[in-house]
């Protein structure tokens, strides 16, 4: 199944919901706003777009949940972020703050094939 194409900004929202869901279980708009350092109205606009695309479920003032398609896309973004972060920190020895910031930028630009090859390279080095 081909996943819906979404903008890097919407991928960031999906990744934030996914990370919060993994850490806390329940996710509210306020949680996403706090994690991303943005306003609740901005999150609400993005959530509306994600909901229209069938990637999240959300009732006003209720919890946010990823749909199966949204979960698959969010996992993919989180994986890309993780692989790039591992490379930046463990191979290039970039400090954590810069590595986090740069991984967020790079994750949107790399193809799935390149991410797979980078992950294989890290695994060959024994960097898990």
Image: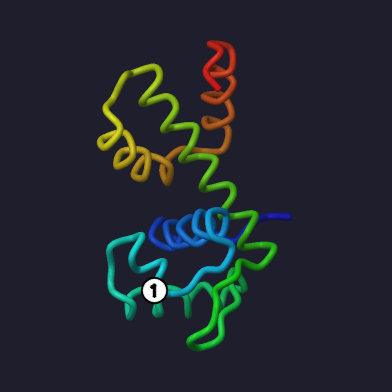
Q: Residue furthest top?
A: 125
* x 50%, y 39%: residue: 80
Residue 72 position in % (x across, y down): 65, 54
* x 33%, y 18%: residue: 92
Q: Where does label 1 land, which residue? A: 30
Residue 25 position in % (x across, y down): 59, 62
Colour convention: rainbow
Quarter that holds the N terminus: bottom right
Judge by depth and name the residue closer to the eye, 1 or 96: 96
* x 31%, y 38%: residue: 102
In this rendering, would 9 be left or right of 22? left
Judge by depth and name the residue closer to the eye, 116 or 104: 104
Which element is circle 1 on? helix
Judge by depth and name the residue closer to the eye, 26 or 58: 26
Residue 84 position in % (x across, y down): 44, 32
When asked about the image quadrant of residue 22, the answer is bottom right
Quarter that holds the C terminus: top right
When asked about the image quadrant of residue 7, the answer is bottom left
Crowd tier of the residue under label 1, counting other residues whose Cα lies within 10 Å: few below 14, some 14–19, many 20 or above: some
In this rendering, would 30 be left or right of 124? left
Q: Residue furthest front?
A: 24
């Amino acid at each position: 199944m081909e996943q819906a194409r979404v903008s890097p900004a919407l991928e960031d929202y999906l990744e934030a919901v996914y990370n919060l869901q993994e850490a806390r279980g329940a996710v509210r708009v306020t949680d996403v706003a706090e994690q991303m350092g943005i306003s609740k109205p901005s999150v609400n606009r993005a959530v509306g777009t994600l909901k229209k695309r069938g990637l999240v479920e959300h009732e006003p003032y209720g919890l946010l949940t990823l749909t199966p398609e949204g979960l698959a896309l969010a996992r993919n973004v989180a994986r890309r972020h993780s692989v790039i972060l591992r490379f930046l920190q463990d191979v290039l020895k970039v400090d954590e703050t810069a590595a986090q910031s740069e991984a967020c930028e790079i994750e949107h630009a790399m193809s799935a094939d390149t991410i797979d090859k980078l992950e294989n390279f890290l695994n060959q080095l024994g960097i898990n």
